[in-house]
Image (tube, rainbow, N blue to C red):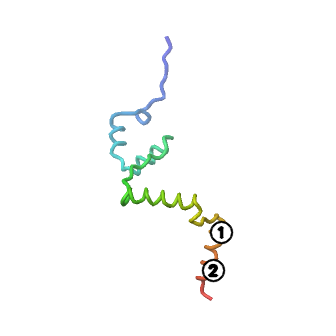
Amino acid sequence: MSSATTTETPETELTPELIERVMRLSPESQARLRELLGEGPPVPELEPVGDWAYWKAEIKRRIEAVENGTMKTYSLQETMEHLRQVAAEGEPK
């Protein structure tokens, strides 16, 4: 009769005490533990800020303005050049 050995020790077992300790962790520590275990970060449940109907209408207005050509858009290169110019103008002479 052979006896199988186990590598489980009190440090490697998922005990009720360990579960209780994990449940008492701060949200930040729980998130870090999930990352370490490979689950990834939790998706935050955020409340909408401000008047959602207003922002929905504003987004729709902006999309329509771009699509019908009444709003100018800028490439990343154009935007970066503008920012460099503004930064250069703000430097002391």
Q: Do the residues labelled 2 and 1 touch (CB within 8 Å)?
A: no
The residue carrying mark 1 is 78
Quote the CA–CA distance across marks 2 and 1: 15 Å
Q: Which residue lies furthest to the bottom in this view?
A: 93
Name above or below for residue 46 compared with residue 74: above
Which amino acid, by three-letter code, is at mark 2?
Ala
Q: Using residue 64 as the reference point, say whether residue 13 is left or right of it.
A: left
Residue 77 image point, x, y percent: 67, 66
Residue 12 image point, x, y percent: 44, 34
Disc 1 residue crowd, few under 14, some 14–19, many 20+, Cα 10 Å: few
Q: What element carries label 2?
A: helix
Residue 42 image point, x, y percent: 44, 46
Q: Which residue is drawn at 49% across and 23% down?
A: 5
Q: Which residue is drawn at 39% across and 52% down?
A: 46
Question: Looking at the image, how many numbered discs can be counted on the residues?
Answer: 2
The residue carrying mark 2 is 88
Nearest-to-viewer mark from 2 and 1 = 1
Nearest the viewer among 67 and 42 is 67
Q: Using residue 68 as the reference point, say whether residue 51 is left or right of it.
A: left
Q: Which residue lies furthest to the top in this view?
A: 1
Q: Which residue is drawn at 36% across and 33% down?
A: 15
N-terminal-most mark, 2 or 1: 1
Q: What element carries label 1?
A: helix
Which amino acid, by three-letter code, is at mark 1?
Glu
Name above or below for residue 88 compared with residue 32: below
Disc 2 residue crowd, few under 14, some 14–19, many 20+, Cα 10 Å: few
Residue 90 image point, x, y percent: 58, 82
Q: Which residue is drawn at 41% across and 32% down?
A: 13
